[in-house]
Amino acid sequence: MGKFLVSEKVKQAAFKANSPYFSIAAKADGFYNGTAYPFCIPNEHAEENLFPPIRQVAMDFFTRHKIKWHDGQNGKPSNHLCSSMVCGVNFLFPFADKPRPLADLLKPKFPVAEMLPIEDGQFVSFEWIGAENYLGEKNKGSSERSRGANFTSADAAVLFRRTDGRKQIVLIEWKYTESYGGTSLKFSKSGTDRSAIYRHLFDHADCPINKDLLPGYDALFYEPFYQFMRQQFLAHEMEKAHELGADIVSLLHICPAHNEDFRKVTSPALRNLGDSATGVWKKLVTPQDRFLSVSVEELFGGLPAEQHPEIEDWVDYIHSRYIWISEE
C-alpha cells in the first residue's frame, strides 16, 4: 500500500466525519471487503461519495450507458472514499454541462477554440471505449462490449475544435491513490497470454510506440505501462477512423503530484529510460504530442475559477475534500 493512500484514508475519514456534505447515516463506518472502515460509507448511502449536485445525474448517466462503477453496487458508486473513479467523476462530471470553464481548464495544455458535445449533449463523457472494437478485445460469454469493465476504457473523454480548425478528442486517464508493483501481467490468472491480444497492433507499421527505443514488447506488460499501451492503441485507432470527425486523438494522464508512489518505473527493462512512469511513456509514444501527463494540482490550480461563479460550490467542495490540491 502506497504512502499517499495511507494518508488519504485518514484525511477522507476526517472529511466524512466533519463535513456538511454527508447525512448522519452516511457518516457511519462502511463495510469494504467484509470489514468496516471509517474511510468508507455504508453501501446504502454510497451516492453520497459524489459531489451533491451531480449525484443523481452522474448515476443516471452511468445507468443509461451501462457503465459499471468500480466496486459499486446497485447502480451506485463505490462506498470507498479513496475510489479513483469517484475522484475522477467528482473532478470532471461538474464540467459536463459547463463548456466555458472546461475550455479554460484545458487551454493551458491544448489549443482549444471551442468545446464540442461528445455524448448526450454533454461536454465530458466517461468510460469511453470507442465506437468500434478497435483493439479486438473479447468478453467471455457476451458479444456486447461493456464500458468500465472487461474492455479498454478511458476514464473520460472530451471533444473540441482547435484554434487551427481541426477537431481533437482527448482521452483522459485519471489516477488518485494508485501505485503499482513489479509483477508482469503478460499472463492472466486463467493462463491467457495477453500479449497475443494486442500483438497485431504492436506489429503494425504505424504502431504509436517507438520500437527502436523499446527494449522489447514484453516490457510493456507491467502496470501502468500495460494500461498506457492499450489506451494509446485506442487513441491511435480512433484517430485513424476519424471517430466523431476528429482529426487528432490524444491521451491525457492526470494524477496528483502528491502521489509520489505512482512515479515508480515498474518494468525492469524500462528503468533506464527515465525516473517516472509517465516520463518513460512520453519518450516511447510517437508522435510525442499524442501523450501528455499533468498533475491534478497544476491543471486545476490554473483554472481561473473566479471568472466562473457557476463552479463556486464545486471549488469549495474540491478544496475541502481533496486538500492536497492546494498544498505545497
Image: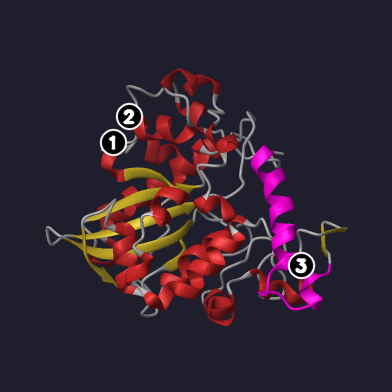
Residue 5 is covered by the magenta coloring: yes
Kindly indicate whether the residue at mark 2 contacts the one at mark 1 (C-beta within 8 angstroms): yes
The x, y position of residue 306, in whole percent, is 36, 68
Magenta-highlighted residues: 2-28
Q: Earlier in the sequence, mark 1 or mark 3?
A: 3
Residues under labels 1 and 3: Cα distance?
A: 43 Å
Q: Is residue 325 above or below residue 227?
A: below
Element marked by disc 3: loop
Q: Amino acid at mark 3?
A: Ile
Q: Amino acid at mark 1?
A: Thr
The x, y position of residue 190, in whole percent, is 70, 42
Q: Quadrant of residue 69?
A: bottom right
- Point out which mark residue 85 bears: none
The residue labelled by disc 2 is 210
Q: Main secondary structure of the magenta part?
A: helix
Q: Amino acid at mark 2?
A: Asn
Q: Is residue 153 above or below residue 126?
A: above
Residues under labels 1 and 2: Cα distance?
A: 6 Å
Left or right, 205 with respect to 98, comes to left
The x, y position of residue 136, in whole percent, is 45, 51
Left or right, 38 with respect to 7, comes to right
- Point out which mark residue 286 bears: 1
Q: Which residue sits at x=36%, y=72%?
A: 123
- Point out which mark residue 41 bears: 3
Element marked by disc 2: loop
Q: Earlier in the sequence, mark 1 or mark 2?
A: 2
Q: Which residue sits at x=21%, y=55%?
A: 111
Q: Nearer the viewer, residue 30 or 327?
A: 327
Quadrant showing the N terminus = top right
- Between tags 1 and 3, which lies in front? 3
Q: Quadrant of residue 248?
A: bottom left
